[in-house]
Amino acid sequence: MTQILPTAVSLHGSVSIPADKSISHRSAMLSALADGTSRIRNFPRSADPLSTLRVLRGLGVSIHRDNDDVLVVEGVGIDGLRPPDAPLDCGNSGTTMRLMSGILAGQPFGSVLTGDESLQMRPMKRIADPLRAMGGRVTLVDGHAPIRLRPAPEGGLKGTKYRLPVASAQVKSCVLLAGLYARGRTTVIEPTRCRDHTERMLGLETHEVGGEREIYVDGGHRIEPGTWTVPGDFSGAAFFIVAATITPGSEILIENVGLNPSRTALIDVLREMGADIRIENERAEGSEPIGDILVSSAPLHGVEVGGRVIPNLIDEVPVLAVAAACAEGQTVIRDAEELRVKETDRLHAITENLRAMGAEIDERPDGLDIEGNGPNLLGTTVRSFDDHRIAMAMGVAACVAHGPTQVVDAKCARVSFPGFWDELDRLAKPR
Ligand SMILES: O=C(O)C1=C[C@@H](OP(=O)(O)O)[C@@H](O)[C@H](O)C1
Ligand SMILES: C=C(OP(=O)(O)O)C(=O)O
């Protein structure tokens, strides 16, 4: 599917965003492992969370939507999963694959996790290493999926103390989930903080030790069934936050958005660039902070971004690059080498596309240098690289481009935001 976007628009109205992808995956997995039936309100129809449901069903978990569209998950308890009769297909979802690996490493049966072409290119040694240190038997193909997991030798997994070599919430969560099955205590040491949904949702104990954070899980930790409500996805909201900021005359409201501080660094960076973003109605939804976000357009200037904030805006870097291209002056993004191992090499993809639109942008090994020239991009044909975040970032760039923009292979937005193109079309009014 090629999406053709109009030019010279401004955005007005209330934006509807899907439920948070990270929290959806975790709510489904934890509900499956709970001792009884859980209900999940606002579970999205995005492809990635649906991959998690497919994998859980393959492990014998019964899941359905009731008449009110609430997802009902019949939890089997941490020891109740059943051996799958085929490889488990994680689709395009790294979170499904890495978190499920932690759960499956602790099972008394073998399993294979596989995924699409892009997922089979992504690094999996980062989870195999700690799982093996816990006694897990994990086989990769040249560091990649398919991942084969076999039962740990006699005595099962053992607790470990693992210091994260990369600021990855997927690796952290994989180890914590394996810790449910390990003898004794598992400690994850997090030198640089990254999203903390797993520990919040499991109610785990954490401590600051010498500037680092330690998270503890004890083997055998049982999970209570319950009712979850998944907040709106900040990472989905991010596209509209940037779109409304850079397109003159815009004003939008995004309600019920997850505002966990380990996710919202984009707001701080955009404000530093001059954006007009207001948060209203802050409250809690279960273990997560949420609120409403009001955005009005504003001129931006360049900024330097790097270090500890990067993990807290990791999925927002492509759209931040679009904002930077529409700002005045230079933006420098560093310490973002993780973007090279996402659904595609996002540093390369965004550079190629923004250059095609006339931006001055250079790729660095761990980031980008962008010479902003105000909202002056040129409409042209760009590619999604089959990566949802690249496709949507280009949809945002199209809003300020002179002349129409075509995004080739735009359908991949459905991985995290199935209604994205319709929503952009609905909010965009000719200027
Ligand atoms: O744990 C999660 O839900 C996620 C963690 C991040 O990946 P990494 O752990 O690879 O940084 C992020 O990019 C991904 O979209 C979702
Ligand atoms: C990297 C992403 O997801 P995942 O790692 O789950 O595929 C993302 O959604 O941007």
Image (cartoon, helix red, strand yellow):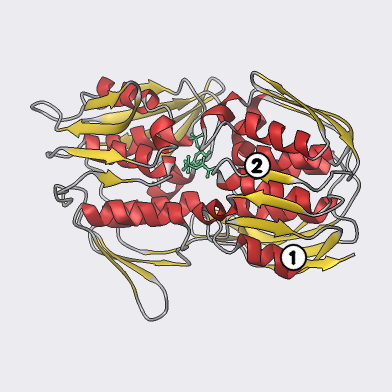
Which quadrant does the N terminus fall into?
Answer: bottom right
Q: Nearer the viewer, residue 47 or 300?
A: 47
Q: Is residue 96 above or below residue 287?
A: above
Q: Nearer the viewer, residue 117 or 134?
A: 117
From the viewer's perspective, tell me whether residue 224 is left or right of residue 358.
Answer: left
From the viewer's perspective, tell me whether residue 359 is left or right of residue 293.
Answer: right
Hey, which residue is sitting farthest bottom in the picture? 67
Question: In the image, what residue occupies the spot 15% across and 29% down?
Answer: 152
Question: In the image, what residue occupies the spot 32% across and 57% down?
Answer: 31
- Percent x, y of residue 431: 90, 64
Location of residue 254 by image quarter: bottom right
Q: Nearer the viewer, residue 160 or 131?
A: 131
Q: Are the residues at dot 1 and dot 2 in contact (C-beta closer than 8 Å)? A: no
Q: Is residue 156 above or below residue 315?
A: above
Question: In the image, what residue occupies the spot 35% across and 41% down?
Answer: 115
Q: How many marks?
A: 2
Give the CA distance from mark 1 to mark 2. 19 Å
- Percent x, y of residue 392: 65, 50
- State yes or no: Cβ of the residue under disc 2 lies below 8 Å from any atom of ligand 2: no
Question: In the image, what residue occupies the spot 42% across and 27% down?
Answer: 123
Residue underneath mark 1 = 253
Q: Nearer the viewer, residue 29 or 378?
A: 378
Local secondary structure at mark 2: helix
From the viewer's perspective, tell me whether residue 420 is left or right of residue 274.
Answer: left
Query: Which amino acid does the dot numbered 2 rest on?
Result: Glu
Residue underneath mark 2 = 316
Q: Which mark is residue 68?
A: none
